[in-house]
Amino acid sequence: MVGEGVLHECLLSPYISSILAINRKPCGVTHPKLREIIHADFFDLAPIETQMAGYDACFYCLGVSSVGMNADKYFQITYTLTMNFAQTLLKYNKAMTFCYVSGAGTDGTEKGRIRWARVKGMVENELMKLPFNAVFNFRPAFMLPTKGLNNALPYYKYVVWLYPVMRPLFPNYFHTLKELGLAMINCAVMGYDKNVLEAKDIVGLANKTRV
């Protein structure tokens, strides 16, 4: 859902001239800006890594829910895979801005009681140690899906009616998928004064300029 929404905003943005999408299965989108690599094993990027050179930013949108998942498997996908991908990119794109989609509730102290939040916090902290040009960690909360896209989570259709009511009451926890995409683009183009962006930061940055 997040990857599809961010890609949609990138295709619309005048600031972006070329996009490489690396997926495990075709995204179903064709566009003059877009080139897609289908690669099954994200733990082994050697066959495609040289094709990842020459880009200004990475919008890393891969992630899984910890619900019902073995703790070791969750760590492998959330931490090990992410760090492997980032370190591979770094070999070819040292001037890159790396934008990581984390999540609301992430524990940057790595000391809390909730395991998934600690693991996400560890990823954020380790990414910020890498010598990219910049690293930004996005912590989206409840996102209103973008109309016309295909990958909204199934349960969203039962709760989207709450969005117009809840956003004014809880602005720190509600935003749109469009705002997340625009905020990530603006971060790559203009930078930001925080490395960790909560929902309120996402909304503010999305509306900072017309993208």
Image: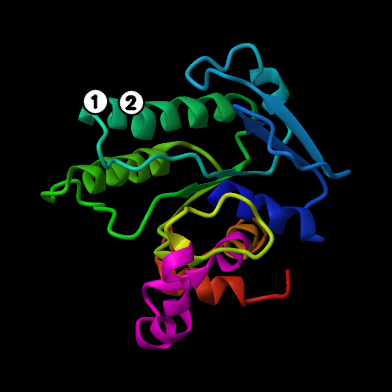
Comparing 154 with 10, the one in front is: 154
The answer to whether residue 53 of the structure is visible from this angle is no
Numbered-mark total: 2
Mark 2 secondary-structure assignment: helix
- Residue drawn at (64%, 19%), measured in percent from left and top? 49
Q: With respect to residue 126, does 1 lie above or below?
A: below
Mark 1 secondary-structure assignment: helix
Q: CA distance from mark 2 to mark 1?
A: 6 Å
Q: With respect to residue 34, does 112 lie above or below?
A: below
The residue where tag 2 is placed is 76
Does residue 207 belong to the magenta stretch?
A: no
> What is the crowding at mark 2: few (fewer than 14 residues within 10 Å), some, or many (at least 20)?
some
Q: Residue 18's x, y, as percent? A: 80, 43
In this picture, residue 167 sits left or right of residue 26 = left
Which residue appears farthest toward the right when viewing the image? 32
Provide the residue span drawn in magenta. 157-181
- Looking at the rendered structure, the kind of residue marked 2 is Gln
Q: Are marks 2 and 1 in contact (CB under 8 Å)?
A: yes
- Looking at the rendered structure, the kind of residue marked 1 is Asp
Comparing 80 with 152, the one in front is: 152
The residue where tag 1 is placed is 72
In this picture, residue 127 sits left or right of residue 68 = right
- Residue drawn at (65%, 58%), measured in percent from left and top? 185
Q: Residue 123's x, y, as percent? A: 35, 40
Does residue 170 belong to the magenta stretch?
A: yes
- Residue drawn at (58%, 47%), measured in percent from left and top? 3
Q: Residue 63's x, y, as percent? A: 43, 40
Which residue appears farthest toward the front when viewing the image? 158
Which residue appears farthest toward the top when viewing the image? 47
- Residue drawn at (57%, 19%), measured in percent from left and top? 40
What is the quadrant of residue 94 in the picture? top right
